[in-house]
Amino acid sequence: MKSICVYCGSAEATRPDFNLAGRQMGRILAESGIRLIYGGGKTGVMGAVADGALEAGGEVYGVIVESMNTPALVHTRLTRLEVTPTIHERKSRMYELAEGYIALPGGFGTFDELFETITWGQIGIHQKPIGLLNMLGYYDPLIEMMDRAVAEGFIFHEHRNMLSIAADPRELLEKMSQHAHPVEAVKRWMRQE
């Protein structure tokens, strides 16, 4: 993977450990020669990921929606910044630029982006690796819910396994590098076989 889109929160009233872990993720992406694609902000975990990548000499592409392109929110030191008219175009552009996706801790926007990306893989729109950086156990309840959905028959286990999960950024990138898309499960889900 030469580029990874990172989904994460921009809230500032969170535990400092989340920002430190975000900065580490950005640094490791840069050290691995992976371009960071992200939402273009300078606050919260979002800003920390970008700062970590930039401090390590990495390329950082931000894609921000026009309404959020304000001095209070936008990161001004990026390699490249694109501004889109709508949030849907923003997500589409980040999707196009990335060869893989990682979700770090965040809120509704992060959940939306993560699940949309998983859903697109489930129905065969893409075959790119998807990762969940479960720092500080943040996503433990979500992982439990996904496992319950598998047990109840709402999610195929192959689709659940599309999501690589780790607490350590390097371990997560290693898992993602071994991604094998469940093509047969996609066919079964779409009733193509």
Image: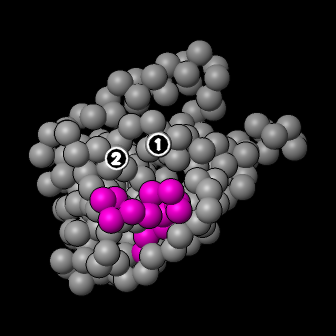
How much space separates mark 1 and mark 2, taking CA atoms? 8 Å
- Work out whether 107 lies above or below 74: above
Residue 62 among those drawn in magenta: yes
- Is residue 59 left or right of 154 when viewed as pictured? left
Residue 70 among those drawn in magenta: yes
Q: Report if the CB atoms under discs 1 and 2 are less than 8 Å apart.
A: yes
Q: Nearer the viewer, residue 63 or 119?
A: 63
For label 1, the SS is helix
- The picture places residue 192, in percent across and down from the top left corner, at 87, 44
- Work out whether 38 lies above or below 110: below
Classify mark 2: residues with Cα within 10 Å, few (<14), some (14-19) or many (20+). Answer: many
For residue 134, which quarter of the picture? top left
The residue carrying mark 1 is: 109
Which residue is depicted at the point 62% across and 62% down?
A: 85
**Colour theme:** one colour
For label 2, the SS is loop
Tag shown at residue 9: 2
* Residue type at the position of mark 1: Gly
Q: Nearer the viewer, residue 64 or 136?
A: 64
- The picture places residue 53, in percent across and down from the top left corner, at 26, 73
Q: Which residues are magenta?
A: 61-73
* Residue type at the position of mark 2: Gly
Which residue is depicted at the point 19% across and 39% down?
A: 14
Q: Earlier in the sequence, mark 1 or mark 2?
A: 2
Is there any visible trace of residue 168 in the rendered image?
A: no
